[in-house]
Image (cartoon, grey):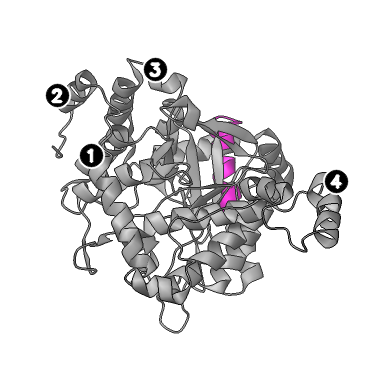
Amino acid sequence: MLEKLGIGEVPDRLHADLLAIGAIDNGNGRILFPPALVEEAIDQAAKTFILHGRDPERSIEVGGNKVYFGTGGAAVQTLDMDSGLYRPSTLEDLHDFTRLQDTLANVSWFTRCCVATDVPGNYDLDVNTVFALLKNTSKPTATSFTLAEYVAPIAGMLDIAAGGPGEFSRRPFMKAHISPMISPMRYGEDAVDVVYECIRHNIPISCITAAQAGATAPATLAGFLAQSLAETLGSLLMVHAIQPGYPMVFSNWPLVIDLRTGAFSGGSGETAVLNAASAQLSNWLGLPSGVACSMTDAKAIDAQYGMEKGITSMAAALAGGNLIYESSGMTASLLGASFEGFVLDDEMHSNTYRALRGIEVTDENLGFEAICGAVLGEGHFLGGQHTYAAMERDYFYPKLADRDEPRTWAENGAQDAWGRARIKAREILRCHNPAYLTPEQEQEIRSRFKILSS
């Protein structure tokens, strides 16, 4: 596809840069990429890189065989903890979600999960989104830029948080989510301009391809994967033309629609297998992989919610997806975000990590002496030293999932997972009020930007 069909609607600056590295203009408005050029871009791409946290202890290495769960999305509705119904997402919600996830061990990086619908204007929205992340978490973060002209001033805000002019670029702790490819097979000029600006300011990037099966990509799963892979390689070729080896997450996100209605379907079995396959393709190329899973279509925190999140996130993790986006708190086919969902998903990820760890086989773990002792002695393993050691080493013990027998569960109020998670989320939001910006840093940011939160 890249060699014979190529990419269309190439912005002028990118057009010149692509021709300079060996791409070909076919004379009909499309740029073609010889196979040798594609292979060169793959060979010279960054295979691993550090995604820094403001707190160095929270930094993560992206690539290789590492698997991390994180967030994403742009939910315009929040599942209200009081009413149990959806309402428009607000800037206060974004601050609260950021505070909440800051305490959750299995959210490895945080991107906004909701859009502050009460903030007018794209620039103010981008500014206040970044401020919410800076104020409320020291994890690696990510954001998006509506227009390229917003990057420089927001980079100035990041410098304030980093300690002074130029400090952010020396150790960037925020990456950009950009979708420079419009399916099928064409570039988007505004997003391409953002890529240039992010590279100029040393902001790592996730170049996201988000085609939809049967709409902007083939309905067949194989055809979908072929087109989506070609498009994400088109993003890599763009980065290669600008600055070879620049840190880029190869974010090839296959999305599915219900072909009966056209509605997005984030919790389907097709989503599970497509994103797992996408991770495998990226890993086969040796590129840092990003996929999107755990995007339930359920509106309530119910059986559908758990089933869809479980099968899609586990599939992506077992396939080796380096960064698994949308994996925490997202509901209602990405239209909603839930505080309780964040808490429940964090526990789900702990179980997934336990599964990824697998089974260690050693002489000690095989337990021949322990088996002999039980068989020839008391006839059980309860209380044995071998059991105690395994109890601490080999098992994960949930704090939210209920393992009581039915009578005890009833005596304790017959509470469901939604209720237990609501209590936990409220406790975190009541107690966790971090101050990751100094008073001087916050004052300087407020003097230079229109910050709408208190």
Q: What whole-number distance in Å separates the C-alpha atoms at marks 1 and 2?
A: 13 Å
Residue 128: image tag:
1
Query: Dot 2: few (<14), some (14–19), or many (≥20) neighbours within 10 Å?
Result: few
N-terminal label among 1 and 4: 1
Number of marks: 4
Between 85 and 207, the residue placed more toward the observer is 85
Give the labeled residue for mark 4. Answer: 363
Residue 447: image tag:
2
Instruction: Where is residue 382? Give x, y as percent.
Output: 68, 58
Which amino acid type is shown beneath numbered disc 4? Asp
Which amino acid type is shown beneath numbered disc 3? Glu
Query: Dot 1: few (<14), some (14–19), or many (≥20) neighbours within 10 Å?
Result: many
Start-end of magenta stretch: 231-245
SS for callout 4: helix
N-terminal label among 4 and 2: 4
Tell whether label 4 touches label 3 (CB within 8 Å): no
SS for callout 3: helix
Instruction: Give the quadrant of the N terminus.
Output: bottom right
SS for callout 2: helix
Q: Nearer the viewer, mark 1 or mark 4?
A: 4
